[in-house]
C-alpha cells in the first residue's frame, strides 16, 4: 500500500431521492477530480426525511441507491462508501440502516448494518426513535483487507459512542475506519469531533467521517464538519458547515510511525 487521497463528502440531503443522488454525484465528481481514490458518502445520503416517508419508499430507495453506488464507482473508477441507506428486511416491514463499500468494478466488498439505533430525546426538543422503523444489525462489522487502500472498517453515526465497535475493528486489523453520520446539530457541537478523535487515538487509526449538514426538513438540523483524522488524532481536513468535500492523505508510513511512538494497541490487557 502506498499513500493515497481519501474524501469525506458532506451533504444536505432532503426527502427527495433523485435530488440527493444528483447532489451526491456532483460531490463525487469534485472529490475524484481532486484525486480521491476512496470516497465516503454520509449516513442518509440518498434520503433524509420523516421515518414514515422513508419506510414507505424504502424498496425504491434501496434499489436505486445500490444501482447508483455501483454506477458511480465504475463511472468514476473510484472506491465508494454509501454511508447508510434503508434496505428492507426480510423478517418484517422495517429496514436495516446499511452501509456498503463498493470497488471500482462495482463489486460490493463490505456491507454493515447499523447496530446501535438512535432512540434519544435530544434536549433541544427533538425526539428520535430510529428503532420504530429500523431493525438493529446483529453482526459486528468485518474488515476488508485492500492492498491499495489499507484495512477498512465500516460503522454508522451513533455507533461512534460505542468504543467496543472500533476496538473490534481494530482487533480484526482495521487501520482506516469510516464513521458516516447525520449527527444532530445539538449533540454534534459538543460531542462529534471529540468522539471521532478519541476513536482515532485509542485505535491509532485513520478516521474518515462523512457528514450531513444544515437543515433537511422541519426542525431536523445536522452538525456538518465531515472530517478526516490521522492516527495521532490530528484533524487533517474539516468540511465546515457547507456541503462539500474534506480530503486528506492516507499514509501507511504515518500509521506505522504513530504505532511506534504510541504502542498502546500492544499494551491491551483486555
Ligand atoms: O436526523 C435524521 O433525520 C436522521 N438521523 C439518522 O438517521 C440517525 C438515526 S435517527 N442519526 C443518528 O444516529 C444521530 C446520532 C447523534 O446525533 C448522536 O449520537 O448524538
Image (spheres, rainbow, N blue to C red):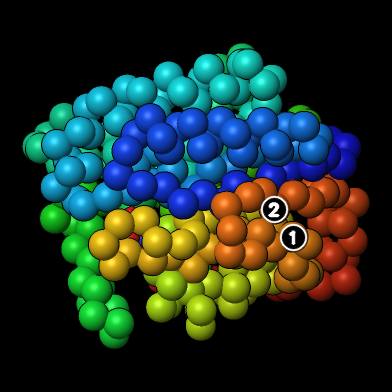
Position in image of residue 133 (x %, y %): 16, 49
36, 178: nearer the viewer: 36
Give the left or right position of residue 226, taking residue 19 as reference.
right
Q: In the picture shown, does residue 138 fall above or below 120?
A: above
Q: As displayed, is residue 98 above or below residue 204?
A: above
- Label 1 and label 2: CA atoms lie apart by 5 Å
Which residue does the numbered mark 2 point to in the structure image?
246
Q: Which mark is residue 221?
A: none
- Please tell me whether residue 202 is drawn above or below residue 99 in the rendered image: below
Question: What residue is drawn where x is 16% and y is 30%?
Answer: 90
> Relative to the observer, which residue lies in front, 260 or 136?
136
At x 32%, y 22%, the residue is 63
Q: Is residue 95 left or right of residue 210?
A: left
Task: Determine whether the residue tagged by mark 1 lies in a helix, strand or loop.
Answer: strand
Quarter placement of the C terminus: bottom right
Counting from the top left corner in percent of width and height, residue 65 is at 39, 28
Q: Is residue 80 left or right of 32 when viewed as pictured?
A: left
Asked if disc 1 and disc 2 are in contact, CB closer than 8 Å, the reply is yes
- Of mark 1 and mark 2, the one earlier in the sequence is 1
Q: Outermost residue, left direction?
A: 92
Q: Is mark 1 within 8 Å of ligand 1?
A: no
Q: Which residue, given by chain and number where applicable, does mark 1 sit on? A: 237
Amino acid at each position: 500500500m502506498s499513500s493515497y487521497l481519501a474524501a469525506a463528502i458532506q451533504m444536505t440531503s432532503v426527502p427527495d431521492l433523485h435530488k440527493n443522488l444528483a447532489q451526491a454525484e456532483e460531490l463525487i465528481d469534485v472529490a475524484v477530480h481532486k484525486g480521491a481514490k476512496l470516497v465516503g458518502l454520509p449516513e442518509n445520503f440518498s434520503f433524509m426525511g420523516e421515518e414514515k416517508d422513508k419506510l414507505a419508499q424504502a424498496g425504491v430507495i434501496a434499489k436505486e441507491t445500490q444501482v447508483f453506488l455501483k454506477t458511480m464507482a465504475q463511472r468514476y473508477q473510484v472506491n465508494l462508501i454509501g454511508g447508510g441507506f434503508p434496505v428492507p428486511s426480510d423478517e418484517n416491514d422495517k429496514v436495516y440502516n446499511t452501509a456498503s463499500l463498493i470497488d471500482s468494478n462495482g463489486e460490493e466488498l463490505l456491507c454493515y448494518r447499523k447496530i446501535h439505533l438512535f432512540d434519544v430525546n435530544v434536549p433541544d426538543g427533538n425526539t428520535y426513535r430510529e428503532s420504530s422503523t429500523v431493525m438493529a444489525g446483529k453482526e459486528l462489522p468485518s474488515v476488508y483487507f485492500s492492498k491499495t487502500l489499507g484495512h477498512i472498517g465500516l460503522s454508522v453515526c451513533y455507533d461512534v459512542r460505542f468504543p467496543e465497535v472500533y476496538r473490534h475493528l481494530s482487533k480484526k486489523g482495521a487501520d482506516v475506519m469510516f464513521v458516516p453520520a447525520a449527527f444532530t446539530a445539538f449533540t454534534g457541537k459538543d460531542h462529534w469531533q471529540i468522539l471521532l478523535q478519541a476513536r482515532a487515538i485509542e485505535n491509532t487509526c485513520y478516521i474518515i467521517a462523512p457528514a450531513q449538514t444544515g437543515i433537511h426538513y422541519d426542525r431536523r438540523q445536522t452538525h456538518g464538519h465531515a472530517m478526516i483524522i490521522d492516527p495521532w488524532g490530528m484533524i487533517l481536513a474539516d468540511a465546515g458547515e457547507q456541503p462539500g468535500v474534506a480530503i486528506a492523505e492516507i499514509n501507511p508510513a504515518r500509521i506505522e510511525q504513530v504505532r511506534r511512538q504510541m504502542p498502546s494497541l500492544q499494551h491491551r490487557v483486555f
